[in-house]
Image (cartoon, helix red, strand yellow):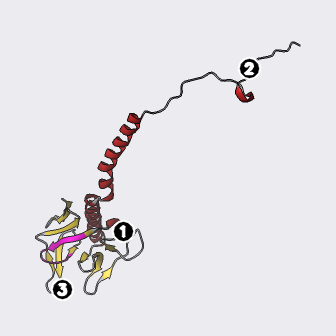
Amino acid sequence: MARTFCLIPIGVGGRAASIARPKRAFTLIEILCVVVILGMASAIIIPQISSRDDLRAVAAARQLMGDLLYAQSRSIALGRMHYVQFNVASGTYQVLDAVSPNNVITNPLTQQEYTVAIGTGPLANVSYRTINFDGASTVGFDSMGVPYSWTSSAGSVALTSGTLAFKAGNYVKIVTVSPYSGQIKVQ
């Protein structure tokens, strides 16, 4: 058997010598350019992330639209009136199957009373701007899905105009309930 030896040049300190390669680094100008670009990007993005009031107003309007559609669909399915009653003082609304006395239905998702709080959780910084269902704060749907305004003095009266506006910061979203057809839109 033949033995092969490899000679490695020994450098200072007894270590193997390496071939000298030029070391690469970023120049000061390159580092400053990256810092300036990151600063500009954060100045544009961070203010938009911290305040998304437009999305909050849309979320509140869409949630209300879904809840109104649920009350309307339940009225049709069960063949009896269902109501959505708004309370400006507490910032809530409830879905009811009877008013005077109020009977709040069970939310099928949470299995709790169907009460939605505005201004908390995902709807933080959202508030009611206006609620007007022919001057009332309660809207109802009959067994055909036709909307009614409800007051304790007049009872259920066919709706002629129904709107609710949510406000979040400078943004406003309006939920409209059309008379007769009961069509619900977010504007």
Q: Which residue is mark 1?
A: 121
Q: Of the residues under marks 1 and 2, which one precedes in the sequence?
A: 2
Alpha carbon separation for disc pair 3 and 2: 101 Å
Q: Position of residue 60 (x, y in %)?
A: 28, 65
Residue 76: image location, x then y, percent: 27, 69
Q: Residue at x 89, y 13 (%)?
A: 1
- Closer-to-camera residue (19/144): 19
| Image: magenta residue range | 127-138
Three-letter amino acid code at disc 2?
Ile
SS at badge 1: helix
Question: Which residue is at a point 27% across and 73% down the rendered structure image?
Answer: 79
Side (left or right) of 42 relative to 88:
right
- Quarter assignment of residue 173: bottom left
Asked if marks 1 and 3 touch (Cβ < 8 Å), the reply is no
Query: Mark 3 or mark 2: which comes first in sequence?
Result: 2
Position of 142 relative to 42 (above/below): below
Q: Is residue 75 above or below residue 8?
A: below
Q: Is 10 contained in the magenta span?
A: no
Instruction: Judge the density around disc 1: few (<14), some (14-19), many (≥20) Cα neighbours within 10 Å.
Output: few
Give the percent coordinates (x, y) of residue 73.
Answer: 28, 67
Which residue in the protein does label 3 denote? 152
Whole-percent x, y for residue 14 in the image? 75, 28
The residue drawn where x is 38% and y is 34% is 29
Left or right: 111 in relation to 150? right
Seen as rendered, the residue at the extreme front is 12
